[in-house]
Every structure is written in C-alpha cells, then in structure tokens.
Image (cartoon, grey):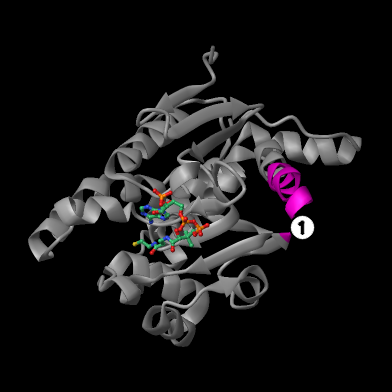
Amino acid sequence: MPNDNEKSFADGKILKHVDEGIGIITFNNPDKRNAMSLDMWEGLGQALTGLRDDDAVRVVILRGAGEKAFVSGADISQFEKTRHNAAASEEYSKRSAAQRALLADYPKPTIAAIRGFCLGGGMQVAMLCDIRIAAEASQFGIPAAKLGIAYGYDGLRHLVSLVGPSWARLIMYTGMRLDSAEALRIGLVDRVIANDEWWNATVAIARTISENAPLAVKAAKITIAQVLKDPAGRDMEAIRQTGAACMDSEDFREGRRAFMDKRKPRFTGK
Ligand code: COA
C-alpha cells in the first residue's frame, strides 16, 4: 500500500512521492512510452500542486517510468477526437494551459530527469523545468512537422532561448532526432550521464539544492526568470523583495556562522 508520501493520479499514470525533501513525479505509462494524455496533464497539475504545498519539499524531479522514455509526446491516439482542427486544437491546448503555467512559474526548483525518448510534448515538459539532466541513452526531437502540427509561442520561446533560433529552425523544419551528445552540445540539456549512474547523479544534484539555503535558491530562481522576460515586463520589485528577504534571513546568519565555525550549515528557509 502506498504511504502518505506516495500518491497516484490519472489512474496511476502520474505518480508522486517524496524522498527526504525531494519531490518525485513519474510519468507512468511505459507501454505507450509515457505519451501524455489530457488526464495525465491534469494529474501532473495535481502532483505539482501537492509538492508545492508540502513545506518539506525543496526541489522536484520529473522522470519517466521504465528505461525507454521520459515522455514520447502528446498521446496521438487522442488527436482524432480532441485536436483535429484549429478550434479543437485551441480547446485542447487550453486544457493543459493551467498545468503548463504552474510548471513554468513553479516556486521550487524543478529538474527533468530524462532517459530514453523525449519528444514533442515531452520536450515541452522538459523545457519548462529549470534544469535538464539526461542519461546517455536519450533521444530528443519535436516531430511536429511530421504530424502537421503548428507549435505555439510558449513551446518555441523556450526552445529558442535554450538552443538559439538557428538550431530551433533545424529541429522544427526537419523533425529530426538528436542524441544526448548533440543535445548537450547545443544546450538543450545541461548534463549527460552514463545510464547506470544517471539516476543517482540526478538525485545528488537535487540533494545539493535541497541542502542549500531555500531563500537564496528562490532569489536565484525569481531573478533568472525576470532576466528572461522582455525588459518592459520585468518585475524589478520582485527581485528587490526576494533579495531583501534573503539578506535579512536567519539562514544568511547561519551560513556565515557555519562557515566561520567550519561546520555544515543547517538551513530552515527562514
Ligand atoms: N502517442 C500515442 N501512442 C504512442 C506515442 C504517442 N506519442 N508514442 C508511442 N506510442 C505507443 C505506440 O503507438 C505503441 O503502441 P502499441 O504497442 O499499441 O502499438 C507503443 O507506444 C510503443 O511504441 P513503439 O513505436 O512500438 O515503440 P518504439 O520504442 O519502437 O518507438 C517512439 C518509440 C517514441 C520513437 C515511437 O513510438 C514514436 O515515434 N512515437 C511518436 C512520437 C511523436 O510523434 N511524438 C510527438 C507527438 S506531438
């Protein structure tokens, strides 16, 4: 039986658990290479909300079940009913908009832990996370042009900001697949790790984040998000406030004292 820390959503296709301050969400439909149905988007939103509201959770990892895929894209078998023309497509997009916005503006650091296929909507999920750590045996691509799908502003904005306009065009015009080495070289992922070390290495990164001062991590997250906005849309006051909260915090005092005492700091997020 799952304990309190373990919950499942979307008929078990989205799993959530917490391991020592690290929230873990698993896309769990390995028979379909973890293709994302609309109910999985809803389940993802519920899992993200639960981890957001759990004070014990300091960082969230998203991963796919099995070794073959992170997420192989949107569930194409739903398209005939739900995404067959412009109006249906807009409605379809609206049904995952709240969950995408939640992930985009998530208040805690997020890591996409990618092993296997990361395609289409899977790339969208991975690109909405703060950091992407891939196992060597991963493949990336956005085959929208092979299916006849127009990609929206948000999806392409993230792609362009990670890999630049020229690679974004090559990826979108061809629908090509990239291996992990090429994905690393163009900045689509941040680190590539041998398959058998990848999960432990990803958890180690999450653990490091979870042991750091939460307000300092939050200040970095908020400020980097503002840097990515157009200058006119930047909230400089939010940057000032998060910076002030951090520099006035008990954790900053603890960080200074621990350094002088040559011991490990104990941060509380206050
Ligand atoms: N939507 C719906 N079903 C999918 C899917 C998707 N995005 N990706 C995989 N599946 C299903 C397959 O239809 C197949 O179902 P079946 O067992 O009932 O035949 C099952 O998952 C396994 O896929 P298969 O193609 O046999 O596995 P593979 O390891 O040879 O290839 C992929 C895996 C991911 C490369 C291949 O399935 C694929 O190209 N999927 C579509 C990717 C895509 O276009 N995504 C963008 C959507 S916007």
Identify whether 123 is placed above or below 145. above
Name, please, the residue furthest toward the left.
87
Q: Bounds of the magenta span?
A: 193-205
State the quadrant of the C terminus.
top right
- What residue is at 75 percent from the left and 48 percent from the top? 201
Identify whether 236 is placed above or below 179. above
- Please tell me whether the stretch drawn in magenta is mainly helix, strand or loop: helix
Q: Horizontal and vertical percent for residue 75?
A: 33, 51
Q: Horizontal and vertical percent for residue 199?
A: 70, 45
Ligand 1 positioned in quadrant = bottom left
User: In the figure, is residue 260 to the left or right of 181?
Assistant: right
State the quadrant of the N terminus.
top right
For the question of whether residue 233 can be seen, the reply is no
Which residue is tagged 1?
Answer: 194
Task: Name the one closer to the observer, 127 or 134.
Answer: 134
- What residue is at 52 percent from the left and 67 percent from the top? 140
User: In the figure, is residue 88 to the left or right of 130?
Assistant: left
SS at circle 1: loop
Residue kind at label 1, given as amino acid type: Ala
User: In the figure, is residue 80 to the left or right of 107?
Assistant: left
- What residue is at 68 percent from the left and 62 percent from the top? 191
Q: Horizontal and vertical percent for residue 261?
A: 89, 35
For the question of whether residue 40 can be seen, the reply is yes
Q: For the residue carrying disc 1, how many other residues have a C-alpha within 10 Å: few (<14), some (14-19), or many (20+)?
A: few
Does the residue tagged 1 have its C-beta within 8 Å of any atom of ligand 1?
no
- What residue is at 33 percent from the left and 71 percent from the top? 144
Task: Name the one closer to the observer, 235 or 80.
Answer: 80
Task: Name the one closer to the observer, 59 or 248.
Answer: 59
Identify whether 150 is placed above or below 263. below
User: Where, by quadrant of the figure, is residue 84 drawn?
Assistant: bottom left
Residue 164 among those drawn in magenta: no
